């Protein structure tokens, strides 16, 4: 086994594939939870400002969570399925190219290696070893940016989004329903800000990005959404109802 083969085998080993797979459903879960929190909070404070009755809030909560969770789940499933189909189609074309024009594919890999900083000689030797080891996998990774051994599962992504939206949406729903009526809206604002801070930090951890930026973005965006819908609900409740 060559040095390159050992490196490639390590790069695409089961641990790395498992981590990448978890990242996909964690991403769907964090986004779903965040959307559930913001969407339901904005909906409920708007309804509360216009018609602050327990029956109206309960109906809005049940309808909002049901519609939102199904929409998120189906939307994520369709999106990931479309991406997966497109990636598989590209892989199939790459298989045909490997069979019909191997010399051209080898030269293409040489050029791709040179772009990473290799000299012509080193790039040629590396390309020959890469083609011998797994021509399809290395071309898919370097030319298409696709790992043929790892496709996102649309069912996992869709289910994660559906469940996450439901869990996230329950935070403002339960808060506004269980808190005393005079404190329902302030309590919902506080609960949502805390929940958005948690999902913001979680998303930053998953993406290895700035925690402060993610937290501020989540909290400010969610708060603005609630303020806008509260203002609309208050306006409609005062001048229309």
Image (tube, rainbow, N blue to C red):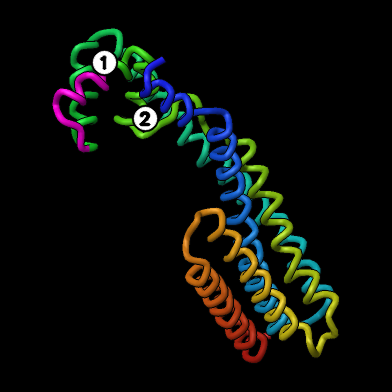
Please rate how many residues cluster around mark 2, counting C-alpha atoms within 10 Å: few if below 14, some from 14 to 19, many from 20.
few
65 displayed left or right of 205 = right
How many numbered callouts?
A: 2
Q: Is residue 118 magenta?
A: yes
Q: Residue at x 23, y 30 (%)?
A: 113
Residue 223, quarter of picture: bottom right
Q: Which residues are magenta?
A: 117-128
Q: Which mark is residue 116?
A: none
- Image location (x, y in percent) of residue 7: 41, 27
Q: Is residue 103 above or below residue 48?
A: above
Q: Residue at x 52, y 28 (%)?
A: 13
Q: Which residue is mark 1?
A: 128
Closer to the chain start, of discs 1 and 2, is: 1
Q: Is residue 96 magenta?
A: no
Residue 193, quarter of picture: bottom right
Q: Is residue 16 above or below residue 179?
A: above
Label 1, label 2: how many angstroms apart (C-alpha)? 16 Å
Q: Quadrant of the C terminus?
A: bottom right
- Furthest toward the top, the residue is 99
Q: Which mark is residue 141?
A: 2
Q: Quadrant of the N terminus?
A: top left
Q: Is residue 77 above or below residue 120?
A: below
- Furthest toward the left, the residue is 120
- SS assignment for the magenta stretch, majority: helix
- Image location (x, y in percent) of residue 182: 80, 90
Looking at the picture, tell me which residue is in the foreground, 99 or 231. 99
Q: Residue at x 62, y 42 (%)?
A: 158
């Amino acid at each position: 086994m060559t040095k390159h083969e050992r490196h490639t085998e390590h790069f695409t080993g089961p641990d790395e594939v498992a981590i990448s797979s978890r990242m996909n459903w964690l991403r769907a879960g964090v986004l779903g939870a965040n959307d559930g929190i913001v969407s339901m909070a904005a909906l409920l404070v708007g309804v509360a400002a216009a018609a602050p009755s327990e029956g109206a809030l309960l109906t809005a909560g049940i309808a909002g969570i049901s519609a939102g969770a199904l929409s998120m789940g189906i939307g994520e499933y369709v999106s990931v399925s479309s991406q997966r189909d497109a990636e598989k189609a590209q892989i199939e074309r790459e298989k045909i190219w490997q069979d019909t024009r191997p010399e051209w594919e080898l030269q293409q890999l040489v050029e791709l290696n040179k772009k990473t900083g290799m000299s012509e000689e080193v790039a040629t030797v590396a390309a020959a070893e890469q083609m011998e080891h797994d021509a399809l996998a290395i071309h898919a990774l370097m030319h298409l940016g696709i790992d043929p051994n790892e496709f996102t599962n649309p069912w996992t992504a869709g289910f994660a989004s559906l469940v996450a939206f439901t869990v996230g949406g329950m935070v403002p729903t339960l808060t506004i329903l269980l808190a005393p009526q005079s404190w329902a809206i302030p309590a919902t604002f506080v609960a949502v800000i805390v929940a958005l801070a948690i999902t913001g930090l979680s998303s930053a951890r998953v993406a290895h990005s700035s925690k402060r930026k993610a937290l501020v973005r989540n909290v400010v965006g969610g708060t603005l959404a609630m303020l806008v819908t509260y203002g609309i609900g208050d306006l409609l409740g005062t001048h229309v109802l």
